[in-house]
Amino acid sequence: MIKNICCIGAGYVGGPTMAVIAQRCPHIKVTVVDLNEKRIAAWNDPDVNKIPIYEPGLSQVVAEARGRNLFFSTEVDQAIDEADMIFISVNTPTKTYGIGKGMAADLKYIELCARQIARVAKNDKIVVEKSTLPVRTASAIKDILDNTGNGAQFQILSNPEFLAEGTAIEDLFAPDRVLIGGDTTPEGQKAIQQLVDVYANWVPKDRILTTNVWSSELSKLTANAFLAQRVSSINALSELCERTGANVNEVAKAIGLDSRIGPKFLKASVGFGGSCFQKDILNLVYIAKSYGLHEVADYWEQVIIMNDHQKRRFAKNIISTLYNTVSGKKIAFLGWAFKKDTNDTRESAAIYVADDLVNEQAEIVVFDPKVGQEQIQFDLNYLNTRTEEENKNAVKSVANPYEACKNAHAIAILTEWDEFKSYDWKQIYDNMLKPAFVFDGRNILDKKALEDIGFKYHGIGVNEI
Ligand code: NAD
Ligand code: UDX
């Protein structure tokens, strides 16, 4: 029975996942390690509201388990040495250099982990791929472990994580399924069973699915590709709705009631963001290309092309509606995170919309309930399209939504935070320049109510012609 778990990587996946394992399995010691000292210090902050990741319900789980059987540390070697099972939960971003640049997953952090495990491990370990990885990565990890290790035996399992940010704790408490892939050998099957036993502490057995390693690795990329494809499909239709007078919310409802299609993931938006969808589809496209499967690659790439188009189209619509110029105009952004209930901004549509508008010399003032100035500047600087000084001058952030909207020509909703719906929109209107425009990139506001106040409302795929 597993008694000691180590997780390498204390990020959006490692942190919440391990916190829930520790809370649900008080008999297992769980140590989450990371090279990032600042991040670990934040996880250990005596004030649980200051942990580095915002997720509804996470701070309560951490408060219950931390110091009991949940630990956060930078002592990576020690945690590896003590563990029976090691989760690798490090980042696997899109490569920014060399072969596969802009498409393939960068596996350097994974390889570093494998080498470190091999160097430190003195007894047999089960190594679990929690990060999202290209199909067949397990064989590379095994190769490194077997050839650079000290003779310890390793079993590699694939256990991809399906949580979505903003609902991570709900998703971890009651997952649709837990997927575990392993070798078909007796040793592989034994390792699978040990991980099944960990999850079985709170997940019903019929939701724990076991497969071979390659099916598990590929299923994760595929699940994200299918989800993102639905968003791009409805977003493609949103543009057609704007030209034809159809309303995309009504179309989504009408098609979603067909039980074969289903209602989820049909919300038209300014475009999907987040650290996973784009990266994982690009990775899938790259894998298909590397096998010479060009039609397969092109098919999935279109999901990304559509998403890029949707983000650009949103910015263009703001510019053309504001009489073809936003130069010197104040545009208020409500929301910067890539979705509600998270402080994560990776690949957020807001970054790209801001970039396009700043190119047209707009002045942007952002309010996001969980994202501050420092992160916003980091995101813009990361794009590398202009100097830090220029970004600082063009995009500012304030801690009050009413202040953000004061004297603005237009408001753009970039994140679907619930609190936006309950603002005093009359007060906001009174303090704006006229005509006052709202560009609702999430279709969360009440079009009629805003129009009654006097706003000119532009939703995604809901304009009348
Ligand atoms: P993240 O960037 O938030 O966290 C990764 C952490 O790993 C960082 O804190 C980094 O410092 C640490 N790290 C990197 N190399 C290390 C090393 N050698 N030793 C110790 N620590 C190291 O990333 P994330 O969002 O948690 O994603 C992790 C993986 O999970 C990725 O493969 C991602 O695709 C996958 N995933 C993410 C989500 C999500 O919603 N974010 C969901 C499912 C799967
Ligand atoms: C995704 C997957 O859902 C999750 O299973 C996987 O483990 C990690 O990647 P995440 O990126 O955290 O999760 O959030 P998700 O809820 O999938 O949203 C991704 C993006 O799509 C967000 O920008 C969201 O706003 C957007 N989206 C989602 C839409 O625009 N419309 C929708 O109908 C659904």
Image (cartoon, rainbow, N blue to C red):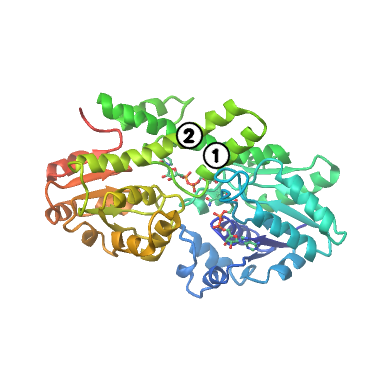
User: Could you tell me residue 214's position as x and y percent?
Assistant: 71, 38
Q: Residues within 10 Å of mark 2 (few under 14, many from 20)?
A: many
Secondary structure category for the residue under label 1: helix
Ligand 2 contact, mark 1 (Cβ < 8 Å): no
Relative to 200, is 298 above or below?
above
Disc ID at residue 303: 2
Relative to 58, is 272 above or below?
above
Left or right for 72, reference 434: right
Q: Nearer the viewer, residue 160 or 385?
A: 385
Quarter of the image where the C terminus is located: top left
Quarter of the image where the N terminus is located: bottom right
Disc ID at residue 281: 1
Left or right for 223, reference 29: left
**Residue pictured at 35% horizontal, 41% vertical:** 312
**Residue pictured at 70% horizontal, 59% vertical:** 113
User: Could you tell me residue 426's position as x and y percent?
Assistant: 15, 52
**Residue pictured at 12% horizontal, 54% vertical:** 430
Q: Nearer the viewer, residue 147 or 387?
A: 387
Relative to 344, is 132 above or below?
above
* Amino acid type assigned to the residue bearing label 2 in the image: Val
Secondary structure category for the residue under label 2: helix
Q: Nearer the viewer, residue 91 or 444?
A: 91
Q: Quadrant of ligand 1?
A: bottom right
* Amino acid type assigned to the residue bearing label 1 in the image: Ile
Distance from disc 2 to disc 1, alpha carbons, whole Å, reads 8 Å
Q: Is residue 33 visible?
A: yes
* Label pair 2/1, CB-CB below 8 angstroms: yes
